[in-house]
Amino acid sequence: MAGVKRIVIRPASSNWPGGRAACIAAILLAALLLAGCDGPQSALDPAGGEARRVATLFYVMVTGAAVLWVAVIGLAVYAAVIRPHPHPERYANRLILWGGAVGPTLILAALLTYGLGLMPSLRAPGGDLRIAITGEQYWWRIAYRVPGEETVVMSANELRLPAGARVELTLDSTDVIHSLWIPAIAGKMDMIPGRTTRLALEPERPGVYRGVCAEFCGPSHTLMAFSVVVMAPDAFAEWLRREAGPAVAADAGADAAGRELFLAHGCGACHTVRGTEAAGTVGPDLTHLGDRRSIAAGILENTQANRGRFIVDPAGVKPGVEMPAFGMLPAAEVAAIAEWLGRLE
């Protein structure tokens, strides 16, 4: 017909700049997502028996969800595009029965059965080594107990484990609810005041991993972390033997001065340093602080500058921390104390 214009709609060409930009953005997004699948704090890069089972459960559930998604989208495309005409009522009734009731019930029952089947092995008590961990604002008190021995080895803010051994953690809290989580090794478990909970670990691969508090516990909740060092069994046994002993530090020169200043300013009233008069139990045990990878519960690298910074202004590093500030001390005294603490091995 004269005067009638035809409007032709063509699909976007793959050479269209906007299409290329969208493809690039999708690739970058996928790369970012995949980058989060490994690392010292990734539940999808398991280094322990429980974490491996949990990761497998995740992949099973993702697969099940993907199958359901494909089925639903495929049905929608079939009904809206391939055969858009009305369908007999009996087909609709069958779809509701099998697709809306029977199918989801069977799939969810299978996933639930699989998940519950993991519980007995994951939560079985006992182990080759028992470690008591107490959550406090905002640090971790750690006590190693070897079955059959009466010795209790105290430490803080860094957990060491033997690879290939089953370890039972007994967990509690002195103030508020915390939650211990080492994503690469095991699931999380709440730490509740007045109640003892238990978590079994089966570290499989030596390395350094990251643990965190997974329950909001105050203004420094996100600053309450710790390193988890998984060691070969022989190396762990040697480390535990040394950890049970007193601190090793020189008794002359700057070391002696730092020790005397530490004791003179009352630090020993809150902290223990075995081998000295310091026997406080309010704060973390500092006996072998020089061997630890970090200070302030996984927040700062264990350097002299950072140790001095925390002594001068602990609340500036961790808001709400109960340690008093020692900013009134001369810089030389702070440096001497920080240097001495770094030599405690």
Image (cartoon, rainbow, N blue to C red):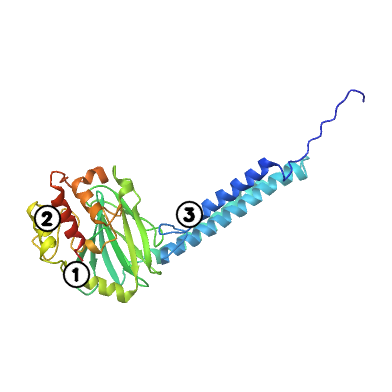
Mark 2 vs mark 3: give the one in front: 2
Which badge, 2 or 3, comes first in the chain's sequence? 3
- Residue that numbered label 2 is attached to: 262
Q: Nearer the viewer, residue 250 or 181?
A: 250
Q: Which residue appears at 27% of the width and 74% of the height?
A: 237
Regarding mark 3 in the picture, which secondary structure is present there? loop
- Residue 343 in the image: x percent, y percent? 19, 63
- Residue that numbered label 1 is attached to: 244
- In this picture, is 319 found above or below 332? above
Amino acid at the residue labelled 3: Gly
Separation (CA) of disc 2 from disc 3: 43 Å
Separation (CA) of disc 1 from disc 2: 22 Å
Q: Nearer the viewer, residue 33 or 325?
A: 325
Mark 1 vs mark 2: give the one in front: 2
Is 35 on the left-hand or right-hand side of 220? right
**From the image, which quarter does the C terminus lie in?**
bottom left
Regarding mark 1 in the picture, which secondary structure is present there? loop
- Residue 7 in the image: x percent, y percent? 82, 31
Separation (CA) of disc 1 from disc 3: 37 Å
Q: Which residue appears at 55% of the width and 48% of the height?
A: 29
- Residue 26 in the image: x percent, y percent? 60, 47
Amino acid at the residue labelled 2: Phe
- Residue that numbered label 3 is attached to: 36
Which badge, 1 or 2, comes first in the chain's sequence? 1
Mark 1, residues whose alpha carbon is within 10 Å: few (<14), some, or many (≥20)?
A: some
Is 90 on the left-hand or right-hand side of 258? right
| Pointer 1 with pointer 3, Cβ within 8 A | no
Q: Is residue 135 visible?
A: no
Regarding mark 2 in the picture, which secondary structure is present there? helix
Amino acid at the residue labelled 1: Ala
- In this picture, is 13 found above or below 212? above
